[in-house]
Amino acid sequence: MSGAPILRHKSDETTPTRSLWRASGSRFLLPAALMLGLAVFFWSTPQLRSDNFIFYFPSGCHIVPIVSMGNIRYLPLMQILNMVGKVGGIQEKKNSIRIWFGNTQIELKSNDPKITYAKEPYDLPQPVRLSEGQWLVPVEFLTTILPRLTHQPVEYQEGTSRIFIGDVKPASFTARLDPIPNGARLTVQFTDKVAVRTASSNGKWIMFLGDRPMEPLEPSYRFHNPYLSELQYDDQDGVPKLVISPTSGGLNFYPMQAEGGKILLADVLKPPSLVGQAAQPAPPTPAAPATTHPPSAGPTPQAAEESPAAPLGPPLPVVTLDAGHGGADNGGHSRDGVLEKDLVSQYVARVRAALLATNKYRVVLSRAGDVSASSEQRALAANLSGAICFLSIHAGDLGPTSPRITVYSYQPSAAVLPAAATGTELPTGAPPVAPPPVDKPPIFVPWEQTQEMWLEQSAQFAQAVQQQFALLNGVEVEPPTTAPIRTLRNVNAPAVAIELGRLATDEDATALTNPVFQQQVAGAIVEALAAFQKGGVKP
Amino acid sequence: MTVRARIFLAFLLICLAAGALYLRSLSKRVLVEPAPHAEEAARAKLSQIALQPNNGTTQLATLYFPSLNEGKILPESRSITWAQTDSDRVRQVVLALAEGSHQGYGHLLSASTSVRAVFLASDGTAYVDLSNDILSDFEPGIQTETLIIYSLVNSITTNIPSVKRVQFLIQGQQVETLDGHADLTAAFTPDPTRVKSAP
């Protein structure tokens, strides 16, 4: 019993390693090992986010993808320069680049925060980066160099993702929430008149604010309220809108405008069945409402339906517009960083505006903003609204020519035209599988065969769209064709997909981001729809 | 704290760190790596066997390669020494397409695309399980994906008469689309209208 402590004592005193272990190990080992373990477990490779930066000009807006590295936000330099002026020449070396822009030169070095502009050095808070052949500048470039490049006033609020260049006067707003019987009243006071259109999508209410740029004082308002939880401003797809999040589902939403569009009043009320059988909650009537909208009976899960400010009358036909991809699904991208999901959103926004301007259609968007939507959800947006047609917009590689457009209608994967009809010899071992003759449409159609009931009408619609595109100057338009496009399969209406080219990683998307071209495409689609309607739609 | 307790604590912490490291590599393997090494090696061996048959007959096969510019698939003849079984012949066709055109036609199918498995059903459906390398060499889009699919389907059904239709799987899974556009939920029959007819 007495030997053990003596031995341990001797050993501790005579072994220097153990002394060191005792001195340092007990202090540092535990936290060091814990830190190591946690660091290894939680360390992850850097990921690129897909937020956008919106450049507002007097003529419109441009969307530029933000590249996040750590907590630093970067923007693609060449895309910015091409937006604000003309690049005269580029001299690129391994780690540096010299750009002739107008009468001056810009010099940048990779991993160096110093930029030389017109032979004057400017220091950015973060270094310039060269990533995958793309020159990236920190967002502070916008306040340091951009005003000198544009020679125009530049308005940028630090920390935001939008900038106003030139004679752009953005409006702003404040919001307030007040309790009312069986609900809450949201009051949004704009600094200028705004034309508001209502929609609902993914359990939220969307208030589109027209094409008027906005610079919100607060990007979002959070409420501790049993009816509304949040009001958020979003223009990530270039379309300014307020996104109103209800605290729970099944509420009624009554938006209206007052004072000529400077005030938006939105009442959120419990539906009558929840309040009781006593009285129907009449929509509140402000003193002088400029525009009223029918109440939305709770947010619908997918569709974003818009109600144009038209007098009450027969319901207008609904057109469903589908911007491909969205959310985590970027689709393709170009060399200058244009993502397919953002590009096609721009086209959809222009087509939507052009259609609404005719006062002949209502528009349902299959996705509002940068959100992901499944093929079923997109089809449901059209089917539930009884759309007269469905138009999906994509961008991709259509060969070397740009701009180039191909219009597709749906092709079932197992349906093949007989060889005699095409004049093409069938390959060996591939007997033709002709669709069975249909005398009259069946009462019930399998969900996965929905679009097969509309193949003829969809082909006619594709023909009408292609004919209008063919009238555009400088655009190569292919004859309409068919493809097994997943998004079209479940649509219960004439449906086409438009693919714009060329969007590829080895080419800039300059031709497709051109606002003039985008507007031409939108106009052609409106004309095509009118022509298709004149031809009649057979169910 | 006794020396033994310290040693035990140190051992415990090292185990914790090693465990965390292993968990991380495990999660990466599950999420990123397609399959265990041994399985991939076995598949590569199968493909190798399919490509180097011993007693097969050599015939001219017709392969279809996509042309983005024309929006069609173009036929190309190639001499292939066929394997014994139809499933190995399907492998041969896919790998020949992945190898690329000898006449300089378009090449959308990645050269690293491998055939994980082929299963022939009695109704003439060939279930072709491709590695996700197929997604690595083309720009996603309606036209590119449609041409890739019919390049494969027309090539397989033309050269292997027992195959009437082709159902694609990626990494062993039935997927909704090839890369966001073309519907892969059903089997494809060949489409002769996709083939550019001879001038």
Image (cartoon, coloured by chain):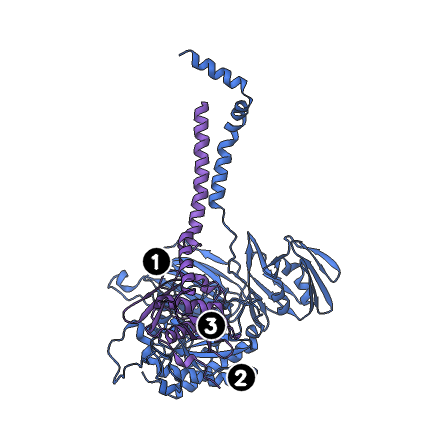
Chain colours: A blue, B purple
Comparing labels 1 and 2, the label whose residue is closer to the camera: 2
Which chain does the numbered disc 1 sit on? A
Q: Position of residue B189 (x, y in %)?
A: 35, 75
Q: Position of residue A105 (x, y in %)?
A: 72, 64
Task: Tell me how far mark 1 sits from mark 2, CA to CA.
Answer: 48 Å
Task: Tell me how far mark 2 sits from mark 3, CA to CA.
Answer: 24 Å
Q: Residue at x 64, y 52 (%)?
A: A125
- Give the amino acid type for the residue marked by disc 1 in the picture: Ser
Q: Which residue is mark 1?
A: A248
Whether residue A385 is visible here, answered yes or no, is no
Which chain does the numbered disc 2 sit on? A
Q: Which residue is mark 3?
A: B144
Q: Which residue is mark 2?
A: A472
- Give the amino acid type for the residue marked by disc 3 in the picture: Thr
**Foreground of the two, A43 or B17:** B17
- Identify the secondary structure beneath mark 1: loop
Which chain does the numbered disc 3 sit on? B
**Foreground of the two, A188 or B28:** B28
Task: Tell me how far mark 1 sits from mark 3, CA to CA.
Answer: 43 Å
